[in-house]
Image: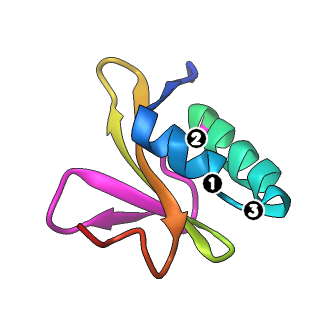
Amino acid sequence: MANYKVLVKKTAADELGRSPKRELIRLIERIRSLGENPRPFGCEKLSAQERYRIRQRNYRIVYSIDDDGRTVQIFKIGHRREVYRG
């Protein structure tokens, strides 16, 4: 199985930069792992959109998958209290 290219939107990159340092490494590792397996155990499809969500402790990563283009695009990264707002 070929790897997927992981693209991070600027807004998601900004959110990642604001996360606590102790969570940053784990979040980056989790995002990189999506290139190997974009639908890991525990991922959930969000009902209202063609997007998925994975957990990393108290943080959520919201992304879409383009199987034809072999890309994963990260839209939001944030604490579980805030990630689904607006």
Q: Is mark 2 on a helix, strand or loop?
A: helix
Mark positioned earlier in the residue sequence (3 or 2): 3
Q: From mark 3 to mark 2, how far is it between C-alphas? A: 21 Å
The mark closer to the camera, 2 or 1, is 1
> In what quadrant of the picture does the N terminus appear?
top right
Q: Residue 18: which disc? A: 1
Residue 70, placed above or below residue 33: above
For residue 20, which numbered disc appears in the image? 3
Q: How far apart are marks 1 and 3 (CA)?
A: 7 Å
Question: Which residue is rendered at x = 75% and y = 62% of the image?
Answer: 20
On residue 33, the disc is none
Badge 3: how crowded within 10 Å, few (<14), some, or many (20+)? Answer: few
Above or below: residue 41 compared with residue 73: below
- As shown in the figure, which amino acid type bears the numbered disc 1? Arg
**Residue at the spot x=29%, y=72% of the render?**
85
- Image point 63% across, 34% down: which residue? 36
Secondary structure predominantly adopted by residues drawn in magenta: loop
Which of 76/34 is in front? 76
